[in-house]
Amino acid sequence: MDLEAPKIKSAEEFFYIQRNYQKQYRDNNRFIVICGDTGCTARNSKAILGNLDRCLKEKDLSETVGTRFTGCLGLCESGPLVIVYPEEILYHRVIPDDMLEIVEETVLEGRIIDRLIYRDPSSGEKYAYARDLPFYKKQVRNLLGGNWKTDPTKIEDYIALGGYEALVKAVTEMSPGEVVQEVKEARLRGRGGAGFDAGLKWEECFKASGRKFIICNADEGDPGAFMDRSLLEGNPHAVLEGLIIGAYATGAREGVVYIRSEYPTAVEKIKTAINRAEELGLVGDDILGSGFGVQIYLSIGAGAFVCGETSALIASVDGRIGEPVQKPPRLVQHGYLDRPTVVNNVETLANVPHIIKQGAENYRATGTEASSGTKIFSLVGKVNNTGLVEVPLGMTLREIIFEIGGGIKEGKAFKAVQTGGPSGGCLPASYLDLPTDFESLTEVGSLMGSGGMIVMDEDTCMVDLAGYFLKFLADESCGCCFTCREGINRLLELVQNISCGRGSLDQLDLLKELAEVVKDSTLCGLGQTAPNPVLSTIKYFEDEYRAHILQNKCPAGVCRALITFEIIESYCNGCGLCKKNCPSDAITGEQKQTHYIDKDQCDKCGICFSTCRNEAILKQ
Amino acid sequence: MINLTMDGLKISVEPGATLLDVARFYGANIPTLCYDEALSPYGACRLCLVEIGEPGKSRLVSSCTYPAREKLNVRTNTVRVMQTRKMIIELYLATCPSSKTIQDLASKYGVTGVRFSPKNEECILCGLCVRMCEEQMQAKAIGFVDRGVNRRISTAFDRKSEQCRLCGACMYICPVCQARCQGPSEESTLCNACLNLSPPCLENNDHTLCYMDPCAACELKKKTNQ
Ligand SMILES: Cc1cc2nc3c(=O)[nH]c(=O)nc-3n(C[C@H](O)[C@H](O)[C@H](O)COP(=O)(O)O)c2cc1C
Ligand code: SF4
Ligand code: SF4
Ligand code: SF4
Ligand code: FES
C-alpha cells in the first residue's frame, strides 16, 4: 500500500476502504499459515517460510498461493505449526525440508500428509484438521482467534476481518458516557491480576476533568507467562483499538503503551501498528472526522517485574525508579504527572472491541455471572499440550489441564497446579473441579493473576518449588519495604534450610508466622502476595515439609541434599554407561562387573539414573 | 476537615495529615525508623503499621504514608499490630544488631528472643540519609542502587561524589551509624542490656556526659522511683 494513503475522514470512507481490503483478502483463497511466534521461530519457522516461498516460486504458485507469517497459534508444544487453508489442515513439528512435500502433496494434490498431522499423546488418535483438535475444540478463541487469520504487520488484514469497526461505532454512534456504560454492563474485569471492574475505573476517569492519560500495561513479568506478548505480537491492532476506544471513553487524549524491552518483537509489532493506524488516521487528531483525537506513545521499560504494579509503572514511565508508592491517593485521581490516569492490561483492552461490537449482553453470555468473557491462560509445565489456551472464565481446572492440555506428560500422576504467576498458590488434585474465576481462586489461597498456569507432576518437590518462587520474588522486590526485601529473603532462607535437611518443626512454625507478617505488612501487591506459594504449599502439602524435616527425605526425590544414588548389585550388568556419563567421576567398576557410586564424590545430578537401561540405580 | 476514628476517639483533622501525624498529635505511641518530621515520609521500615477498616475487613498500612480519610476507623494497638511489629523488630535485630536504636526498640517492645540466623548488615535501607541529602542538604549525592536483596545506598556510579559537601548530615540521621550498641555478641544478636542497667554515673556528672537521648537507664530509674 502506498504511504500517501489519505486519512479516513468518515465512517463511510472506512467501510469503503474495508470492502477493498476484504476483496484483497478473499482473493487469496488458498494460503499457508506459518506460526511466527517466538517459540516456533526458535524452532526455525523463519527457514520454513523461506523454503515455502522458494518451493512456491519453483512450482509457479507464488501468485495463487498466499503465505502468512502469524502470531502464536497456541499449541506451542508441537511447533513449528503450519496450517494449510482453506481446508485448515494442521501440520505440526514441521521442518524446513517438509515444505516441498507439503506444496506437492497438499497444495497441488489435496492429499493429507499422514506423518505430519497431530496425534493426541494420550489417546493416540490422529487429527488432520485444526478445528477437530481437542486442544482447540474446547477453547473459545475470541481474542487469540485473530492470530490465525491476520498478518500482525498488516492493518489491511485486521480491517478486512472486521477490525476497527468497534472504533468506528464508538466514535460515530456513541457518546463517551455510553461506551463507559457498555463496558460497565459487560462486567469486564481487569485481566492484569486484580480483577478490578474496568468500567468502574473508566467511569471515574471519565468524570474527572482536565488532562488525562490512559496506559496499556504490557510489562508482563511472570515467569512462564506470555499471553500479553502473544497478543501484541499476533494481533497488535486489537490491543491498539481497545486503547483508542478507552481513550475516547475516559476522555484521555494521550495514551501510552508501556512495554518491556525484553519483548523486542512485540515492541516492533506494536510500533508498526501505531504507525499504520496513524497513516490511516485512526490514531491522531480528528479521528474519522469526529473531532476526537488521541496520540499514542510507546514507553519501553527495562523489564522489572515490580514495574507491572501500576504506581511503579507510572514512576517508570516518568523516568523515575520503578518503586510502588502508597495508594491512596488513587491513580484515577493522581496518576501520571499527577493527572487522572487509567492503567489497563493488554488483554483487558483487547476485550473492549468485542464488547462494543457485539454489545454488553452478548459479551456476558460467555463466562460466569461475576466474571464474564474469556481468559487466556498460559498452560505450561508437565502437561502434554503446553501453549496458550483461551477459555470462558469459570471453566474448571480439570477441563483445562486434562481436556485441553491433554493430561500429564508420560502418563504420570497430577500433583498440583500453580495459578497466578510467581505469587499465586499451588492447588492439589482435590481442587481440580474448581472453576477458574477471580473469586474461587482467591478463596482457596491462590490467584487468577495474569493467567499463568503451571502444572506439576509427581516428580515435583513442593518445598523446592516454594523456594524457586521465593528466589524470583526476592530478586524482583523493589526493596523499599523492609518486610518485603528482608522478609522474603528470610522465608527463602528457612525454606532452603528445610530442603537441605537442616530444618526443624520450630522453623516450620516460624516460616508460617513470618509469611503472615510479610503478607500483612508490605506496601504493594508484590509483597502482599509473595508468601502465597509458601502458605499454599504448607497448607496442602505439609506432609512433604514434614518428611524433609523429620525423616530427612525428599519424597519427590528432588532436593539434592536429601537424596542418594546407589547401584543395586543384582541389576547391574556392568555395561559402564553410567560411568561414562557421570560428570563427577563418581562411578567406578570394571566392564561386565558391578559398578559402585562414591557417595562423597557424587554430585546428585541424576544423569546415571536416567542413563541406566537396567534400572539398576536406586534413588532414595 | 476530615473526620475519623482513632482508637475509639472521634477526631477531625486538616486534609493532608497522615495517620502518623494524627496519632502523634493525640499521643498514640507508634515507633518509627524511617520517618523524620523534617523529611518526606517514605514507608520503608514498616514499623509504624496501624490497622484500618472495620474488624473482619481490616488491613495494616504504614501510618506515615497513609493519608487521613473521611470515616476511617484506625486502631493503633491491636493484637495484630503488636504481633506484626514484634516480628518486624525481631527481623531487624537479626539483620542489624549493632544499631542501638534497634536494640532500644527491642527492649521497649519486649522482644526477648531472635529465631533467625544473625547477619551483620551496616544499613537497614531506611532511606533517611537519601532524603536528608536531597531534601535538606539539596545535594542529591547519594541514592538507592539496584533492587530487591541487592539494594544498597551509594553515590552515582559508586564514585566519589562531587555533589557531596561532606556535611555529615547523612550520618547524623542514620539509625545505624549513630550510637553503636556494644551489647550483642557474635552468638546472640539480642542485647537487652538496657533492661538490666543499673543507673550509671550520669547523675554524678550533672547529666553532662549523657549522649543517649533518651537514656534508657534514666528512664528506667524514673519508672522505678515512681
Ligand atoms: C508486582 C505486580 C506485578 C504486576 N504485573 C503486571 C503485569 O505485568 N501486567 C499487568 O497487566 N498487570 C500487572 N499487575 C497488575 C497491575 O497492578 C494492575 O492491576 C493492572 O495493570 C490493571 O489493569 P487491569 O485492571 O486491566 O487488570 C501487577 C501487579 C503487581 C502487584
Ligand atoms: S512490597 Fe516489596 S515490591 Fe512492593 S513496595 Fe514494598 S518492597 Fe517494593
Ligand atoms: S555528607 Fe554528603 S551525602 Fe551526606 S548528606 Fe551531606 S551532602 Fe549528602
Ligand atoms: S545508611 Fe543509615 S540512614 Fe541511610 S539507609 Fe542505611 S540505615 Fe538508613
Ligand atoms: S515510619 Fe512508617 S514505614 Fe517507617
Image (spheres, coloured by chain):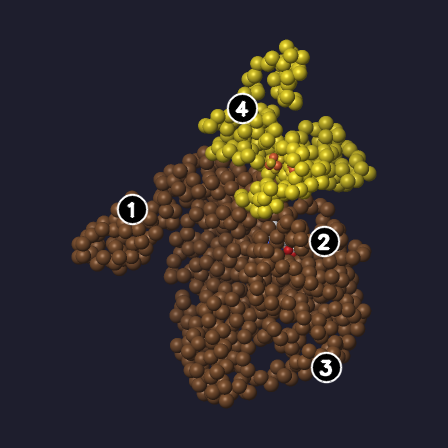
Chain colours: A brown, B yellow
Q: Which comes before the other along the chain, label 3 or label 1? A: 3
Q: Circle 3: is it few (<14), some (14-19), or many (20+) Cα within 10 Å?
A: few
Q: Circle 4: is it few (<14), some (14-19), or many (20+) Cα within 10 Å?
A: few
- In what quadrant does ligand 1 lie? bottom right
Residue A4 picture location, percent across and down: 71, 79
Q: Residue at x 59, y 51 (%)?
A: A306
What residue occupies the far right of the structure in this picture?
B1
Mark seen at residue A336:
2
- Most foreground residue, B2 or B189: B189
Helix or strand or loop: what does disc 2 sit on?
helix
Tell me the CA gap for discs 1 and 2.
58 Å
Residue with the mark numbered 3: A16
Q: Circle 2: is it few (<14), some (14-19), or many (20+) Cα within 10 Å?
A: many
Q: Residue at x 26, y 46 (%)?
A: A598
Residue A385 picture location, percent across and down: 46, 65
Establish whether labels 3 and 1 are both on one chain.
Answer: yes
Tell me the CA gap for discs 3 and 1.
76 Å
Residue with the mark numbered 1: A601
- Most foreground residue, B123 or A183: B123
